[in-house]
Amino acid sequence: MSTSSDQSNSDAQDSVPKAVVSRLSLYLRELQHLIRDGRDTTSSTQLGSMLGLTDAQVRKDLAYFGQFGYPGVGYRCAELVSEIKKILGTDQRWHVLLVGVGNLGRALLGYKGFGQQGFRIVAAFDTDRSKSGKEFEGVRVYHLDDLARVVAEQNIRLAMMAVPSEAAQPVVDRLVSAGIQGIMNFVPVTISVPDGVRKVGVDLAIELEQLSYAVVKSGEKV
């Protein structure tokens, strides 16, 4: 049973703008780069300049989650990395599954950045039985009929989906039924999920459209 304190913490978390959470991931990457370069500390000014943000924006974003700086020192990089990982939930290892082992799916299986940030793809699924039992990038492929069993056996809570558009919602329904709590959707269609299940859409064509818009507008100002 949740306490009033638990509820207040949950409400505070829900009130954080999505843009702030997105920037947390950017701060995390830059801090990790600084650590690799041998830096122990940084400041809001330095962190902001790396990302084209003001120091005030950096401080405001971090203030949603607490106070992390030290007077005369700034931020201790390793400590702030640890705190941001706790906020994002990546201070633990996440088991992830992938549905759809086509060209995009195989590219996702080969992406090393997931593992570097605490995410491990432990199983892939496809309806093509000729792929069942095979491994791609060290990940075993199962038939989609085995979804619920594998999710339970491997304690999987997150899923990525790269399937044909017409299969998207039926696959989502099966993921939800199997107990998946978060879905990253690489299919360029809108999906519906019940309360309690989170979704993130990644449409590469939309990202290119936004980029082309920015380039066109930039050209108009010249």
Image (cartoon, rainbow, N blue to C red):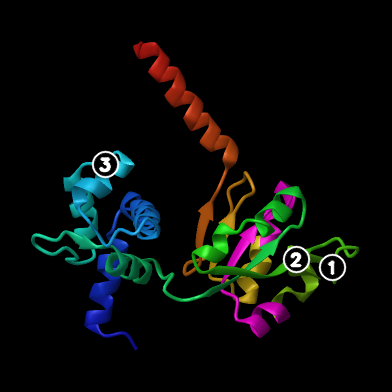
Q: Which residue is mark 2?
A: 125
157 in the magenta segment: yes
C-alpha span from label 1 to label 2: 11 Å
Nearer to the camera, 3 or 37:
37
> Viewed as shown, does residue 150 lie left or right of 7?
right
The disc, 3 or 2, on the residue closer to the chain's N-terminal end is 3
The mark found on residue 26 in the picture is none
Nearer to the camera, 162 or 118:
118
**Which stretch did the figure color magenta?**
149-171
**Mark 3 and mark 2 residues within 8 Å of each other at the beta carbon:** no
Q: Residues within 10 Å of mark 3 (few under 14, many from 20)?
A: few
Nearer to the camera, 11 or 152:
152
| Residue 186 on image: x %, y % | 62, 50
Numbered disc in front, either 1 or 2: 1
Q: Check the picture and name the quadrant holding the N terminus.
A: bottom left
For badge 2, the amino acid type reads Phe
Q: Quadrant of residue 141?
A: bottom right
Q: Which residue is mark 3?
A: 49
| Residue 20 on image: x %, y % | 31, 52
For badge 3, the amino acid type reads Ser
| Residue 219 on image: x %, y % | 41, 14
User: Farthest residue in the front direction?
Assistant: 38
For badge 1, the amino acid type reads Lys
Q: Which residue is mark 1?
A: 134
Numbered disc in front, either 3 or 2: 3
Numbered disc in front, either 3 or 1: 3
Q: Quadrant of residue 61?
A: bottom left
